[in-house]
Image: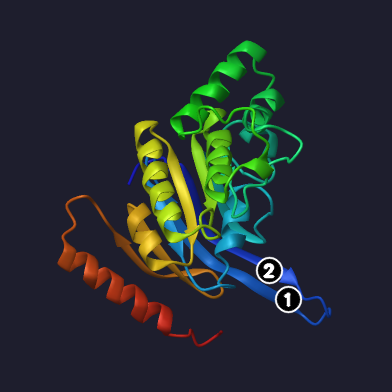
Amino acid sequence: MSAEPVISFKDVTKTFRRADGKGDFVAVDKLSFEIAKGEIVAVLGKTGCGKSTMFNIVAGLTEATEGKARVVGHDPFREFNFFRGKIGIVFQNDRLMPWRTALDNVLLGLQVLNTDPKQAEETARHWLARLGLSGHENDYPHALSGGMRQRVSIARAFAVNPDILLCDEPFSALDEMTARDLRAEFVRLVRQNDKTAVFITHQINEAMEIGDRVMVFHRPARIAYEARLTAATGEAERTQVRDDIMRVLSVEPASA
């Protein structure tokens, strides 16, 4: 592990006030981990286990109640503006603006960063081409398939050249063949462009296909199991990891 991890959580806890006002709900419980530059970490867990809350803390969308969360040495919530252009996010839904073409949707982040218009258009066209969307630059979202729209969303995230990519179940709404192709494409682009990625999922196979490391969360968010996977990891070892993950997910934590 790098001496200076890209993402670091140290005893991070996040609580929310219950809607009925009767006490607090603990979503993240003393969570600690580090993610090194260039790693792709898949975070796996059942719905409601707190993985999206962890994601929101990394993205600077919510603040930890206790503990220390740092991204490239900075507090992502209190120093939110520092991360402009440094973090790219791909959500479960493509979140494209329906009144903007594919090209204009990819241009959005570059325009927010005040990139030179000519350079911005060249960059946007480049990433649409990289994602197999040449010829669709002027199509509006309603004219694109679900997979194509998500490709536009990925192109938009890569176009601003972020150091870190955060993905919250981006392929869960797609059919398996389309999702499989996009998973492979996503991993290839992350590696080729030397990015660091955190990928939220609730699918075991997806986590194992994408992650250099798989972290399995129990509720409230804490690491119940962790495994590293490389190109050299054999099928027998992968089967064992898959079996271990299934066993861990089937065990309901005592506090749940």
- What residue is at 16 percent from the left and 68 percent from the top? 236
- What residue is at 59 percent from the left and 55 percent from the top? 92
Q: Give residue 104's position: percent from left, percent from top.
A: 67, 28
Packing grade of label 1 (10 A; few <14, some 14-19, many >=20) is: few
Q: Give residue 31's position: percent from left, percent from top.
A: 51, 64
Check disc 1 and give the amino acid type.
Asp
Q: Give residue 119's position: percent from left, percent from top.
A: 59, 14
User: Residue 15 has which mark?
Assistant: 2
Secondary structure under tag 1 reads: strand
Q: Which residue is mark 1?
A: 24
In terms of depth relative to the viewer, which is nearer, 34 or 99?
99
Packing grade of label 2 (10 A; few <14, some 14-19, many >=20) is: some
When asked about the image quadrant of residue 203, the answer is: bottom left
Residue at the limit of the structure toward the bottom, as seen here: 254
Q: Earlier in the sequence, mark 2 or mark 1?
A: 2
Do callouts 2 and 1 mark residues in contact (Cβ within 8 Å)? yes
Q: How is the image coloured?
A: rainbow
When asked about the image quadrant of residue 130, the answer is: top left
Check disc 2 and give the amino acid type.
Thr
Mark 2 and mark 1: span between their CA atoms?
Answer: 6 Å
Which quadrant is the C terminus positioned in? bottom right
